[in-house]
Image (cartoon, rainbow, N blue to C red):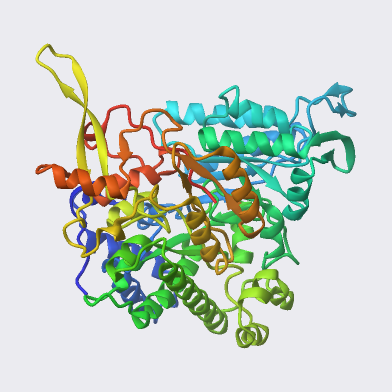
Amino acid sequence: MEVYNPMGLARTIFDERYTIKEGEIWSEASWRVSNHVASAEDHNHRIAIAAEFYDVISKNLFMPGGRIWYGAGRPRAQLLNCFVIPTGDSREGWGKTISDVIVISGMGGGVGINVSPVRPRGAAIKGTGGISTGSVSLMQMINNVGDVIVGGGGRRMALMLDLNLEHPDLEEFLDKKLDKKELNNANISVVLNEDPKEFIKAVKENKMIKQYHNGEYYGEISAKLVWDKIVENAWTSGEPGVLNGWLANQENNIAYYKDLVSTNPCGEIWLEEYGCCDLGALVLPRFVDSKGSFDFDLFKYAINIAVRFLDNVLTVNEYPLPEIKDNCGKVRRIGLGIMGLHSMLIKMGIRYSSQEGKDFVNKLMDFLKIEAYETSIDLAIEKEPFKAYEPEFVNSGFIQRSIPKYLQERILKHGIRNCALLTIAPTGTTGMVSDVSTGIEPIFAPAYWRRFYRPTADGSRLLDKELVINPLWDEVKDVSLLEGAYDISPRDHFEMQRIAQAHIDNATSKTINLPADYPVDTLSDLWLKYLPELKGTTFYRAGSRGEEPLEAIPLEEAKRLVALHTAHAIATTAEQNLMDCVGGACEVPEEFKPHIDVHFVAPAIQFA
């Protein structure tokens, strides 16, 4: 394979986001990253291992996370994407939380926080005789930090703020973002810490949920009222998400050591307090040969190198807080994922929504899981297991359900290098640079209307639109392979997430796309069905955030329009990926924005 060479918008984003000096080309940056991360190795092997890293990165078989590209080779290189921090129920605890947010955000990291430890509004403060202002007050303070950081010209702060279902401040929490339009610098989610099946039963039977904090009872609230509010607002605006903390902790490989308390802002990794996201993705279309066959031998080679690479990142990283350095050194959690799943299926001649597609993805994810765990065991033999490893590791729900007995026996004999290894991240910007579909998402649309402002003779601007088609339209034998996010039923979206999640020890970021007229009651029923099997869920309904610059055209309508139009624009994968960006955080280059719409705002909805 030749060295990859990003072109067009992919090159523009790469130059602006990931190069360390003007004029640095892809191959140079690939070596810079490889050499930096290989510095974790013994001196005698460093150059050889750097060469292995370079081989998979330069050919775009493996795409490290954006922070790794940006930070490698810089002084005090902070290479990790996101973190989860705790908060305490005191002035000192609040101050520490806000300080941590400022430090982490200043070093380019996103932050997830479960604010449930804070006592509810109106609770007595015995030490001062005062009354608590509640958990939402702390959220507002954290959100205001985001205003300052954005206003100061820094990178947009990424936040996840979540609250447990049983917390007495739940209604206020939901109202602040959903009705009062506050907390706008954060994604918000409700956390289920009890078996979701019990919550589902309470919803269907219209029962009450007990609200409590630190064992103290505060009253009850209707399960159906809460659920209806969540569903209605998810349908209307894409938030809140629902995080399945019960399942995450049932499958927590280090349940004997630490609980998982929150996800990162995009929801692809459940983390313990002071946990971190160490991300990279295998670029799936690169493993498909000219005959449309998937090269599993090459895939295995890339998995082995990618796991070692991400493990090394934890060693060479400059951590924003000593607590994070201490925790991550003990658990060595990594997040190896994939991107370009739909691009891969198209090259293989398989429809995303087909049973054949689901079966192949299931096979692929199982292969990835087994090889990643094999490699981590081998690294434990070569180096040492992660410091918090205990034999109870193999008793986790994930290991017992998903890892073969022979691998469990190898872990018991040798230990394992990483407490968890796999994730499905959104890969918004890195997917653009690789010019493939993002994460496990389908392409946005086979064809769409692009709205833009056209200057007029009198100096004003007129809103216009043009037909844009996927560049593969004339290359594939069957254009039905190009089914877009809204051609695929919500049930098939759920199924793809469920299949991927079954093989993932961390979590899976996936947007369930809904047509504009999708019934809210149908969404409620479908969501309840899949809720127990997923560690997190969220949605985006077409048009729910106002007029969008890119309007998807259904596949059958697209066939008709393309036949009628002799001239049309050609889509780029990068432009389509804009609609998958988390909260608009793909940070589109300035020169590209006027091309689509100077008022472009991407949906803030893709997490978990």
**Residue 531: horizontal and vertical position, in percent?**
64, 53
Q: Is residue 375 above or below residue 537?
A: below
Question: Based on the displayed image, in which of its 4 quarters is residue 190 positioned?
Answer: top right
Foreground pick, 370 / 333? 370
Q: Position of residue 268 (x, y in %)?
A: 53, 55
Question: How many numbered marks are there?
Answer: 0
Q: Position of residue 511 (x, y in %)?
A: 48, 49
Q: Quadrant of residue 407?
A: bottom right
> Residue, x 75% and y 45% (percent of image)?
204
Q: Is residue 348 left or right of residue 273?
A: left
- Percent across and percent down for residue 361 are 44, 69
What residue do we see at 46% from left, 52% from top?
489
Report the front residue among 431 and 353.
353
Q: Residue at x 28, y 50 (%)?
A: 446
Q: Nearer the viewer, residue 304 or 38?
A: 304
Which of 359/184 is in front? 359
- Residue 571 visible? The answer is no
Q: Is residue 281 visible to us here?
A: yes
Residue pictured at 49% horizontal, 71% vertical: 362
Which quarter shows the N terminus? bottom left
